[in-house]
Every structure is written in C-alpha cells, then in structure tokens.
Image: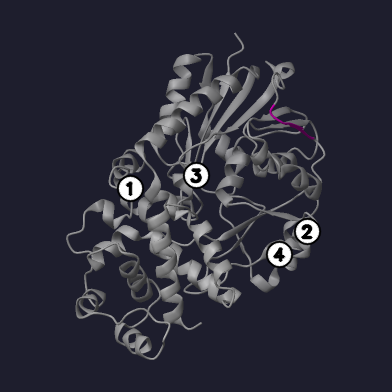
C-alpha cells in the first residue's frame, strides 16, 4: 500500500472507533483481519496514523475546524509526518485507493502558519476540557508542557533482569536496535520511538527475552517498583499484582531472598504471571489467586505491601490515547472508590513498622494525593516516609525530578521522560 491507501485505511479505522465506541487496538486488529492483503509494514503505518491522530485529537481538530476522522488523518499527514499538502493532493489523484480529493478549505487549513491561533489551553495540551484543571492542580505553572508531554509516541523500555543477566549482555543481544540507557533506573534500556511509519521493534522474539534476560517495562514503572524499596529477606505483598511486572522487578531487587506474595482480585489479570515468573527465574514468589480468606494468614505480617491501584491510567495516555477521550467523571469517581476499599484491605496486612507503597499510573490529584489524604484520615497510624531521602538512597546517580515532594513522587513524560506515575510510601507506627 502507498501512503494514500494507508490514509484511507486510517480514516476507516477512526470511523469505526467513532461509530462503535471501542478501543483502538480492537478496531485495528479487526481491520487487519478483514484486509489480509495488507502487510505488516502497512498495518504498522496505519496504526501509527490512528494513534498519532488520537494523541493530538483536540489540536488537530481545532486546526482543521472539525474532529472528523478525515480531518484528523490529513492533519497528521501534514503536521506530524511532514507531507507537503500540494504533493499529497497530487498523490491522491494518482492512487485509486486514496481518500477523496483535498478541498480548497482543507488546503487553506493545512497550510496555515499558525493553526492553533486563539486555541484554548486544553486544546493546546490535547486534554479533555474537564481534565485540564486537574493537571494544573498537579503540575502548577508547568501543566501545559506536562499535558503536551503525553502527546508524543512512547519508546519501548526494557528492564534487565539481574537474576539472569546484566546490562552489557542485554545491550549486546539487542545491538541491532541500538538501545539507549533509560532515564533514572540503572538497569533500564530504551528503544526510542520512530517517526512516521516506523515499526515498533519486536523484542519478544529476541533470544534474550525468551531466556528471561529482560522484561518489557516502562522506565517509570521500573522506577516506582524500585522506589518501594523491597529488600532481600523481607516479607512482601504485591496486592494488585496483575501480570506481575512489579512483582518481577521486586524479586530481582530482593535477589530471590525473602518472600513475595502476588495477589490480584481478578484471575484473568493474574494469569500471565506464572509463565513470566518461570522465564525470569523468580523463585521467591508465591501466587495467591483470589479465594475467600486467601490472605487471612498474612494479616499484620508484611514488611511491605505494594498497592498498584486501579486508576484512570492518565499517565499512560501516550500508549492508549483513545482512553483519554473516553474518560468520564463517573469513571474517575469509581476508581477512587475502588482505591479506598483496596487500601483498607491492604493496610491490614502491614505489620507495625512496616510500609505501604501506593502506586497509580495516573496524574490526577483526586486519585493520587486525594486518595492518600483520605486513607490517612481513616488510618492515622500510617505516616509518610521521607521521600527525598528515599530517592537519594534508591537512585543516587539520578537528579531528583521536579515531581519529588516530601510525601510523594510524580513521574511524567514531560519531567522524567517516562510514563506518568504516582507513588506514596507510608510507614505504620509501632506505638
């Protein structure tokens, strides 16, 4: 397929999203199933067009005077992919699979020198209007830049598994991808995102991945797992373990010494953890699937309980930009309610003098500092640790980010070049 045909396909996928209100990944998968003539390069390019359009839907729509699939894709082709409008027009005439010819009004908009003149701030940051004030609350005067940080393509980050390998070996294994060192974390590698129709490197077929030398994990996720500071010999609970990404990171930090209990309320989310533990060589993990009373014997015994809480996922909008435009206030309220219930259950597992690490992949204060403040009102025996000292001890070679406060830590694409994360570590009083 040539570019005009790929643009038509992207318009078709975005129209499907708009009509059927479903995730972009599903729409792209179904399009590929129904168009088997399209090669892997075509599918990658079409996916890039769709996700680029969704990441900056508001600003592309404003520039074009409409948020229609066609308007978004044409704007992406010119403003993000660097196509010249006149050349694009000529290519449409020569390709039977191309979209309809570019109209005079579209041409004027595509060649505007200041396409966002007069645009409100939430459009410039490509945020839902009702979410923008919450970003301002979290980031203060830097909120516009932080919002814009969520509009770029994300890299592929890898965590070297110290249980089986080391940084040099994994770098050599992946040298064909020219990996870079990821920010903050000493055992993180990064494969930067490409431009235009670049395909994401398929590292899961690499022998290093198959041997358990590394895992795919955003540097921010690696950082908050390390910041929780699980230590060798401890009794640790990963209360919302899911597929086990942070469980595996903690097992490596602990050198397989001590015990990690991996639990999740959803068996489907937990299912991948078994194969991942085996491949990674994590031998100090006991999986506790959801059953009545399955955690009763652990009450008051844990040195550290990690709660990777359900949230809106605003910190991952680079990777799932369609979720940005589906989020509602009602969904945010539901996540906050779930967090309160989970935190109360997790707190009962922490021993006196033990710690509770609360993590979200969100950048909204309601489900971050708000949830922690409400939890502390219900549980005054939990107090924040010194987060600045904790940062210095965990990441001595990394400069403290602007999102580091006395009582919590924010990571974000704009400030740390990672996905967005929040973590607050609390200690249970002994008296």
Is 88 rendered above or below residue 142? below
Q: Are marks 1 and 2 in contact (CB under 8 Å)?
A: no
Q: In terms of secondary structure, where does tag 3 sit? A: loop
In reply to whether residue 93 is colored magenta, the answer given is no
Q: CA distance from mark 4 to mark 2?
A: 15 Å
Q: CA distance from mark 1 to mark 2?
A: 40 Å
Q: In terms of secondary structure, where does tag 2 sit? A: helix
The residue identified by callout 4 is 171
**3 or 2: tag closer to the N-terminus:** 2
Seen in the image, is 4 located left or right of residue 217?
Answer: left
Q: Is residue 236 visible?
A: yes
Label 3 environment density (alpha carbons within 10 Å; few <14, some 14–19, many ≥20): some
Q: Are marks 3 and 2 in contact (CB under 8 Å)?
A: no
Q: Residue at x 29, y 86 (%)?
A: 86
Residue 96 position in % (x across, y down)? 41, 86
Q: Nearer the viewer, mark 3 or mark 2?
A: 2
Q: Residue at x 36, y 78 (%)?
A: 99
Marker disc for residue 143: 1
Residue 349 placement: quadrant? top right
Judged by its main secondary structure, the magenta piece is strand
Q: Nearer the viewer, residue 4 or 356?
A: 4
The residue identified by callout 3 is 400
Residue 201 position in % (x across, y down)? 62, 67
Q: In terms of secondary structure, where does tag 4 sit? A: helix
Q: According to the image, what is the colour scheme of the structure?
A: one colour
Write the start and end of the magenta stretch as one range. 285-290
Q: Nearer the viewer, residue 36 or 357?
A: 36
The residue identified by callout 2 is 210
Q: Nearer the viewer, mark 1 or mark 2?
A: 2
How many numbered discs, if any? 4
């Amino acid at each position: 397929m040539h570019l005009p045909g790929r643009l038509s396909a992207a318009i078709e996928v975005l129209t499907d999203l708009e009509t059927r209100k479903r995730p972009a990944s599903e729409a792209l998968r179904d399009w590929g199933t129904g168009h088997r003539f399209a090669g892997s390069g075509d599918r990658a390019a079409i996916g890039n067009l769709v996700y680029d359009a969704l990441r900056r839907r508001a600003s592309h729509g404003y520039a074009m005077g409409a948020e229609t699939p066609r308007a978004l894709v044409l704007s992406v082709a010119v403003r993000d992919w660097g196509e010249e409008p006149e050349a694009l027009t000529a290519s449409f005439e020569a390709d039977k699979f191309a979209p309809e010819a570019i109209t005079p009004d579209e041409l004027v908009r595509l060649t505007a020198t200041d396409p966002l003149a007069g645009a409100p701030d939430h459009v410039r940051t490509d945020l839902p209007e009702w979410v923008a004030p919450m970003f301002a609350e979290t980031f203060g005067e830097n909120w516009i830049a932080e919002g814009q940080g969520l509009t770029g393509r994300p890299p592929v980050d890898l965590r070297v598994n110290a249980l089986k390998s080391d940084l040099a070996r994994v770098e050599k294994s992946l040298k064909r991808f020219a990996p870079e060192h990821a920010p903050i974390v000493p055992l993180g590698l990064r494969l930067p995102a490409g431009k235009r129709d670049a395909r994401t490197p398929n590292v899961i077929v690499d022998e290093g991945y198959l041997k358990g030398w590394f895992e795919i994990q955003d540097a921010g996720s690696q950082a908050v797992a390390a910041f929780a500071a699980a230590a060798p010999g401890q009794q640790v609970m990963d209360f919302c373990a899911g597929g086990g990404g942070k469980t595996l990171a903690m097992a490596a930090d602990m050198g397989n010494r001590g015990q990690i209990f991996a639990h999740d309320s959803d068996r489907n989310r937990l299912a991948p953890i078994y194969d991942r533990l085996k491949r990674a060589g994590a031998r100090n993990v006991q999986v506790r699937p959801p059953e009545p009373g399955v955690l009763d014997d652990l009450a008051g015994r844990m040195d550290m309980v990690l709660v990777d809480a359900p949230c809106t996922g605003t910190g991952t909008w680079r990777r799932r930009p369609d979720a940005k435009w589906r989020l509602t206030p009602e969904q945010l309220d539901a996540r906050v309610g779930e967090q309160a219930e989970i935190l109360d259950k997790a707190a009962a597992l922490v021993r006196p003098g033990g710690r509770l690490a609360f993590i979200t992949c969100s950048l909204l204060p309601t489900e971050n500092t708000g949830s922690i403040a409400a939890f502390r009102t219900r549980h005054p025996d939990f107090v924040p640790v010194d987060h600045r000292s904790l940062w210095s001890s965990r990441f001595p070679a990394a400069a403290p980010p602007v999102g580091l406060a006395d009582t919590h830590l924010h990571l974000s694409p704009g400030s740390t070049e990672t996905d967005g994360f929040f973590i607050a570590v609390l200690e249970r009083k002994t008296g």
